[in-house]
Image (spheres, helix red, strand yellow):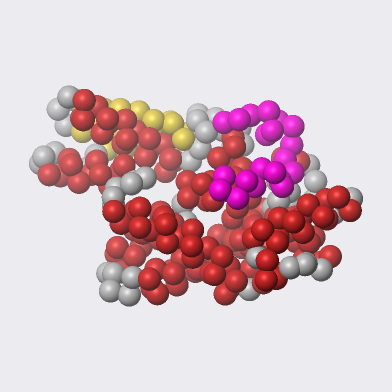
Amino acid sequence: MGSSDRQQQLQAFWTQLLPANSPLPIEALALLDEALTHTSSGVTPHHEQLEFLGDAVLRLAASEFIAAAYPQMPVGERSSLRAQLVSDRWLAELGETLGIERWWRIGPKASGDPTAAATLQAELSEALIGAMFKIAGLQSVQAWLTPHWQRSAEAVLADPHRGNSKSALQEWSQGQGLGLPQYSCREVSHRHGDPRRFHCSVTLPTDLSAEGWGGSRREAEQQAAASLLDQLVSC
């Protein structure tokens, strides 16, 4: 895990996250270090296995949060809300809020690419959730995430299309009798963390079209939809 300085840094970070569960034993510190060590660093063990676990924990915790906070919400709306509360965008925002870049270990190429920051924040935040689950259990994860989700859920419900331009564009196009938007995506880069890895175009009848890029197909589609919505607003 490295020097005693690194151990002290990790203890400080954990105390910031869950003060009631501090200090951590050395085995738990090793898990936390693993979660914050990105594959680009060339160090093993790295974050990937904990990120995989964190994905499952995040979805379960979000489902329980929504069920408790909005018991009357229909299942379809719950799914839509959960999608936003577990999205890469939300995870990147969480990482930024935590200042996770102060604690992570990443490779020189990644550190020299400011456009990859959001991807790194999202991946390591999800790995952090996986580590927290293994160290402190689901209830602690739930309690820690709930205040973050409360703020985000309120914002999403106040503006259902916030961060979901595809839904907004589809609603507009169907309201205009134009049918569904048509998306065409392709991978244009194989570089890890490239925010322009995928290119997507979206079209509607009457020669309406726009394009977008993103680190995933979903992000590229969202950006393309947002670009077309911007065109419609300016018309």
The quarter in which the N terminus is drawn is: bottom right
Q: Main secondary structure of the magenta part?
A: helix
Q: Position of residue 195 (x, y in %)?
A: 52, 33
Residue at point 29%, 69% (across, down): 73
Could you tell me which residue is drawn at 54 percent across and 51 percent down?
94
Instruction: Decide: is 150 above or below 125.
Output: below
Pick the quarter of the image with the C terminus: top left
157 shown above or below 185:
below
Say how many tags the image has: 0
x%, y% of residue 159? 28, 50
User: Is residue 134 within the magenta segment?
Assistant: no
Residue 97 shown left or right of residue 71 in the figure: right
Magenta-drawn segment = 96-115
Location of residue 17 with respect to 171 vertically, above or below? below
Q: Is residue 182 left or right of residue 34?
A: left
Depth check: 214 or 26 in front?
26
Q: Is residue 29 above or below residue 178?
A: below
The residue at the point 44 percent across, 69 percent down is: 65
Query: Between residues 205 and 123, which one lies in front from this camera angle?
Result: 123
**Outermost residue toward the right?**
3
Q: Which residue of the protein is positioned furthest toward the left in this rendering?
A: 177
Residue 88 in sight here: no
Task: Give the image location of residue 128, x and y in percent.
Answer: 64, 57
Is 97 included in the stretch rendered in magenta? Answer: yes
Which image quadrant is residue 172 in? Answer: top left
Q: From the top left corner, tell me how far across and down residue 18 is, in percent.
A: 65, 65
Q: In the image, is 73 to the left or to the right of 2? A: left
31 left or right of 5 in image: left
Residue at horizontal 78%, vertical 52%? 9
- On the question of residue 98 being in view, the answer is yes
